[in-house]
């Protein structure tokens, strides 16, 4: 069937056929898998039938075509419906549809970008809409593009605050290229939602966010068609609250409790009740020609700092990002309303068109970054490191999406001082190391931060830079090079007794400690472990072989940080060099940075004591 | 000054004096500290002056009095105002006020419960309101109490989705004991908020959530007083949007940009402009008598499973929690709309009065738990382990609050099978280990899960239990005991060649591997490391001393999990026993659990291969 232009009268029978086919195929896919969410697919079948037959503009043979519309299933568990749509559009065949959830099949339980028509992984509810904001921002603010972003949302996920960050941001940014279709099927996993079919509360809230809002019957084809027509004609983002029945079309499950997330008990009977297997094919409308666009980049010099100067690495982040924005037009920056602390404001001043103020909504910030990178932009998102923890699930899912996402967390550790523990990132290394494929960088001086930020720009994947609030001495010349996976031995001699391994502010404490140790006749090697993941195992093992003890010191909890990273390297190699791990001990309070570093047991004095004990225990002078 | 009854005519001059005193003291505290947020305090000074003088019911000499109202500063950075209020109420003196942010002072940069009148730490924006929902739920649903929960919110933090989870939940639960006072001072950290003084969008949204809403001038004492009177008389939660001026009262900073989070440039001039230092004292109204309440607990038998039976530990969680609810009336349960997966539904069925359905809003769920525990309840909050990552910042802050919070994450690891990576917790151990003072338990069978859950109930602090989706054999009798910090050697002989350390589903893979290894002439010790934090270092070091190699295996990423925990123990002891760490390698997809365990390299076959290689390398037969 050819896709009809929206202005034509709709063919209700044709659409009904398509909707039934999508139901049948959803039932069959789940039956073949022995698991999955057919009922959550059936409720939205009619909504998606109309979208594919009459509105979506997408060339399934060319998913890389930048003019294609985007379709995001925020309710990712409706994957049987999505895959049935792909079959209906001729993108996959019957056999592949029935490989749903098989080991090795790209048709996983929840969609991932392993499928070429999927932009981002969904399945953690409340993420698809906020990510779509990023996709829409790219079209609206950067590319002056005509594509539309269609998002199928569930009603259950409207309980997630991240959805409301998205509604707020889209309204504020005037994203008239967005259509959110909410499949209000009344039933969550374990029972009714808070509002069931009363869409009035949601509609009022979304309208108050600046969206055009419609409330319709999601099984009434005329209503659905009219709603889409109105949505794309509007001068604001459009939300359609469509009342539907979960499991619609099959009496045994339609609007029934306890039918979430499992195959139908009698799929054959269900298929028969739905009118049997069909193989209608929809020719989805082709996208219009992509429009060229230009980014003008103000030239900015590469920052360079003089050795000995005191510069906070957060400041270097701001400077370096500004420079990178000038040499790479795909670099964009997002910040969580703390740009005068992270220094993302410097980028904003130089490249205002590519800066996104995300306000205090870290989930939306990360989500927008994930959305932007689907269009080839290189997003750098910054906030206090502590507050990035707010978006941890979004970073986790970004890894499932294989996203190219660069993060910067400032104000890490107790060394921020008087603001106190709520503002101190002390778990960021641990949590972000445990993100699949992530890179963790922790520069110890400003020139190094510049070099590492450029490495992040060139690296495709999830990377995180940890920056320090306090100004610390520049110790490297601007010509020195640093790379992901590297380390730098800052101090060494002919016969080192002990090795100090640190990064960031504790590297400076370690250098001071090494000086003091030298006075006591103990030669300390000092390694700047600026790349915490991947880690330079060779440098660690060389230190284990060549010195008698290793002391790690970090402005972070002991768990999952630098010390444990080093321990892993040593233990796997069967190295018997004793390791002493200094990390933040005890719950910190407010106070001057020096007092807090001392109280945490990670200042030069504590390093000296630990290194001396360790060295003497194993026979140093 | 004595607190006046609300019905009396207000004394505007008295209130003005109090407001000015609060401004003066906020300015002085920040000046003494050399940092802090005086301007964010000054905007809300009049709002709080009226509250303390006329509405709050609180005995500052008896913060443990359960009839006291609660006051939560969701905008925790307005701590100078809070501490100035304490001084005005006679709770602290001048000297202590001026110790603000000093090392060792309990008056930290952001409030924490080190101060007896502070329920919970704030300072990560968007948390105070959702936590207050938990405090209000306790009063409304459990205690039939008369206390009110007053929450001072900032306008910037309304961008956080968690605030909207809170507005939604309070409306749904009909929490008419809540008053949210939003200090709309128009300016965030780096500039104007999205809505500045136009409160209409927020008001419409909050009204649509079922709250009574008022929009007022926050410096008009009559308006503030009338708003509070109306708020406490209402039959629904009340929100007051108060337009204020940041830095109000001092021309140099009033409604000026770039005045966030720093002391005033000329504090003496500011104090003079505000009319000088005052020392008014307000006698805050005493709370009414606390009302007794009763919890009826349905008797439930302690669950016990037969050895050899196959039971999922998530099922045991549901059973055990139900039992604990019957023996301890302070046990309450919360779940994120997945109670039929986590099996929290079993508790809900037995103890409906103490079960809280939190819908798909994990931040609100954790926040409500934190709120409930301020009243002495023992909250157990459950969801898929993967989705607890959504609330990571709330758990982080719960540790700053020294909260008694019990978490359960189900569906961990690749062994969940076909649902795919979005649903798999693979970073939960790493992230939650890095929470200050946390306990991490990972039961390997159902009877152990029961015992450990009871240990969690008795433990005060943040604890996390990781449960498995799949049914696994019961290997321990119901009479065996397990404790926080313990481990259990499941298999050992006279001369073990190698030690396998695992927990949860990989313990069963390890037992199968040990059997296979025995057939190959390699004796394997198997340690069930069910307490990942604190960890049983003695058992690990004994294994290191007594066997030739250690293999750890876990259904989790390598970073920050069991293997790294063991590595830390070995490296700190300088043990040279080689360690092989098996953890999930590669990005998993969908498939049967066995296929995914094999693909991840953590099934029995991979354990056999790793153990055999390790044992032979070091000279086993």
Image (cartoon, coloured by chain):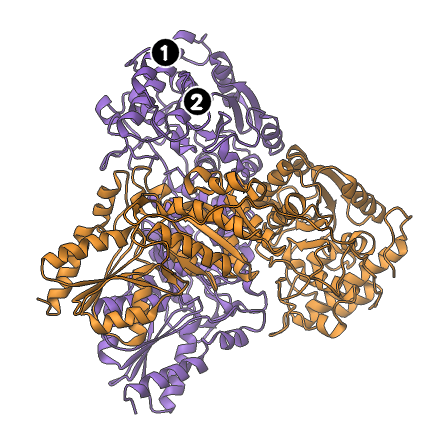
Chain colours: A purple, B orange
In terms of secondary structure, where does tag 2 sit? Answer: loop
A318 to A207, vertically: above or below: below
Residue B294 circle label: none
Q: Quadrant of residue A263?
A: top left
* Residue B327 picture location, percent across and down: 53, 52
> Count the marks: how many?
2
- Left or right of B177? Residue A520 is left
* Residue A199 picture location, percent across and down: 58, 26
* Residue A269 picture location, percent across and down: 32, 15
Mark 2: few, some, or many residues within 10 Å (few <14, many ≥20)? Answer: many
Disc 2 target residue: A43
Q: Quadrant of residue B64?
A: bottom right
Front-lying residue, B276 or B473? B473
Quadrant showing the C terminus of chain A: bottom left
- Left or right of A469? Residue B75 is right
Quadrant showing the N terminus of chain A: top left
Disc 1 chain ID: A
In terms of secondary structure, where does tag 1 sit? Answer: helix
Front-lying residue, B613 or A517? B613
Q: CA distance from mark 2 to mark 1?
A: 15 Å
Who's the residue at 91% across and 48% down the image?
B9
- Left or right of A510? Residue B353 is right
Disc 2 chain ID: A
Upstream in the sequence, badge 2 or badge 1? 1
Same subunit under labels 2 and 1? Answer: yes
* Residue A343 visible to an observer of this rendering: no
Mark 1: few, some, or many residues within 10 Å (few <14, many ≥20)? Answer: some
A263 to A310, vertically: above or below: above
Residue A17 circle label: 1
A321 to A603, vertically: above or below: above
B591 to B61, vertically: above or below: above
């Amino acid at each position: 069937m050819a896709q009809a232009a929206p202005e034509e009268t709709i063919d209700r029978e044709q659409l009904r056929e398509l909707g039934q086919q999508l139901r049948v195929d959803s039932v069959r896919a789940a039956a073949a898998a022995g698991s999955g969410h057919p009922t959550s697919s059936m409720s939205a079948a009619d909504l998606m039938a109309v979208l594919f037959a009459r509105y979506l503009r997408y060339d399934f043979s060319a998913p890389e075509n930048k003019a294609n519309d985007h379709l995001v299933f925020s309710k990712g568990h409706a994957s049987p419906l999505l895959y049935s749509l792909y079959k209906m559009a001729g993108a996959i065949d019957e056999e592949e549809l029935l490989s749903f959830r098989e080991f090795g099949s790209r048709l996983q339980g929840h969609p991932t970008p392993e499928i070429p028509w999927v932009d981002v992984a969904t399945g953690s509810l409340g993420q698809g809409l906020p990510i779509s904001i990023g996709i829409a921002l790219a079209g609206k603010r950067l590319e002056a593009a005509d594509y539309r972003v269609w998002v199928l949302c569930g009603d259950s996920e409207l309980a997630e605050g991240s959805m409301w960050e998205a509604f707020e941001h889209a309204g504020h940014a005037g994203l008239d290229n967005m259509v959110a279709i909410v499949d209000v099927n009344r039933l969550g996993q374990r029972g009714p939602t808070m509002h069931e079919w009363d869409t009035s509360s949601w509609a009022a809230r979304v309208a108050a966010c600046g969206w055009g809002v419609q409330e319709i019957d999601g099984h009434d084809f005329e209503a659905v068609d009219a709603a889409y027509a109105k949505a794309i004609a509007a001068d604001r983002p459009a939300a359609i609250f469509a009342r539907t029945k979960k499991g619609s079309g099959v009496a045994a499950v339609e609007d029934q409790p306890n039918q979430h997330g499992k195959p139908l008990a009698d799929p054959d009977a269900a298929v028969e009740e739905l009118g049997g297997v069909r193989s209608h094919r929809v020719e989805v409308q082709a996208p219009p020609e992509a429009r060229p666009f230009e980014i003008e980049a103000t030239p900015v010099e590469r920052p360079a700092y003089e050795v000995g100067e005191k510069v906070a690495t957060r400041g270097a982040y701001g400077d370096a990002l500004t420079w990178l924005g000038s040499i790479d037009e795909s670099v964009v920056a997002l910040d969580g309303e703390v740009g005068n602390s992270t220094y993302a404001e410097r980028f904003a001043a130089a490249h205002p068109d590519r800066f996104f103020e995300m306000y205090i909504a870290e989930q939306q910030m990360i989500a927008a970054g994930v959305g932007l990178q689907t269009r080839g932009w290189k997003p750098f998102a910054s906030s206090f490191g502590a507050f990035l923890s707010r978006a941890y699930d979004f970073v986790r899912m970004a890894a499932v999406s294989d996203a190219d996402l660069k993060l910067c967390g400032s104000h890490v550790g107790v060394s921020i001082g008087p603001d106190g523990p709520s503002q101190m990132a002390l778990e960021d290394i641990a949590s972000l190391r445990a993100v699949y494929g992530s890179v963790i960088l922790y520069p110890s001086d400003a020139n190094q931060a510049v070099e590492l930020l450029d490495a992040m720009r060139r690296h495709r994947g999830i990377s995180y830079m940890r920056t320090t609030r306090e100004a610390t001495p520049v110790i490297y010349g601007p010509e020195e090079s640093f790379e992901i996976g590297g380390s730098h031995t800052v101090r060494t001699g002919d016969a080192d007794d002990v090795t100090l391994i640190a990064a960031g502010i504790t590297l400076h404490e370690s250098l001071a400690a090494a000086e003091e140790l030298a006075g006591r006749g103990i030669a300390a090697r000092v390694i700047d472990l600026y790349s915490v993941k991947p880690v330079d195992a060779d440098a660690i093992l060389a230190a284990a072989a060549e010195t008698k003890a290793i002391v790690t010191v970090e402005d972070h909890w002991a768990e999952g940080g630098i010390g444990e990273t080093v321990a892993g390297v040593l233990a796997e190699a069967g190295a018997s060099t004793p390791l002493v791990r200094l990390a933040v001990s005890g719950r910190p309070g407010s106070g001057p940075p020096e007092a807090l570093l001392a109280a945490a047991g990670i200042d030069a004095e504590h390093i000296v004591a630990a290194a001396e004990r360790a060295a003497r225990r194993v026979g140093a002078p």
